[in-house]
Amino acid sequence: MFSFVPAYIAYSIILTLGIAGVIFSNNLIKKILSLNIIQAGCLLFYVSICYHTDLSPPIIKNNSTDVIVNPLPQVLMLTAIVVGLATTTIGLAIIMKIAKFHKTIYRSEIDK
């Protein structure tokens, strides 16, 4: 039987690093990258809890009685990856505008 405890510890570490980066980083680009780390941790967690070794791929064959994997979690994760990519690009574009206007990407200098 596969134990999920080491996997949960790994996801907890990844999420903690991402949250710490968002909270404690002064650099706006590092904040965006920390959000990507949080997203990667959430995606890995969700994919791991939906993983089954005893089910067939979601391909229906003629006269097949195999129990197939639900393809909905896979579709949701692909959608989450695309949304995360779009959010990252928009965030970086906004940071470029901030850097052009304020001449810095550090939060403490922008607040002054």
Image (cartoon, grey):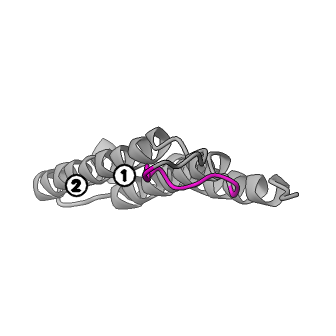
Determine contact: label 2, label 1, CB under 8 Å: no
2 or 1: mark nearer the eye: 1
Quadrant of the drawing holding the N terminus? bottom right
Q: Left or right of 86: which side holds 57?
A: right
Instruction: Locate the C terminus by quadrant.
Output: top left
Residue that sits furthest to the front in the current view: 63
Q: State the count of labels.
A: 2
Place of residue 81 in the rendered image (x, y in percent of width and height, measured from the top left): 36, 52
Q: Which mark is residue 3?
A: none
Taking 111 as reference, is 101 left or right? left
Instruction: Kindly identify which residue carries mark 1.
Output: 81
Percent across and percent down for residue 98 are: 18, 51
Prevailing secondary structure of the magenta residues:
loop
State how far apart marks 2 and 1 are (Cα): 12 Å
Compare residues 28 and 109 and report the one nearer the observer: 28
Q: Which mark is residue 89?
A: 2
Residue 78 seen anywhere in this rendered image of the structure: yes
Q: Earlier in the sequence, mark 2 or mark 1?
A: 1
**Quick one: 77 or 101, which is closer to the camera?**
77
Q: Secondary structure at mark 1?
A: helix
- Measured from the top left, where is residue 66 in percent x and y? 59, 48
Tell me if 44 is positioned left or right of 59 in this view: right
Q: Secondary structure at mark 2?
A: helix
What is the three-letter code of the residue carrying label 2? Answer: Thr
Magenta stretch, residue numbers:
53-62
The answer to whether residue 87 is left or right of residue 72 is left
Q: Position of residue 57 (x, y in %)?
A: 51, 55
Residue name at image x 58 percent, y 45 percent: 65
At 47% from the left edge and 50% from the top edge, which residue is drawn? 58
Q: Amino acid at mark 1?
A: Ile
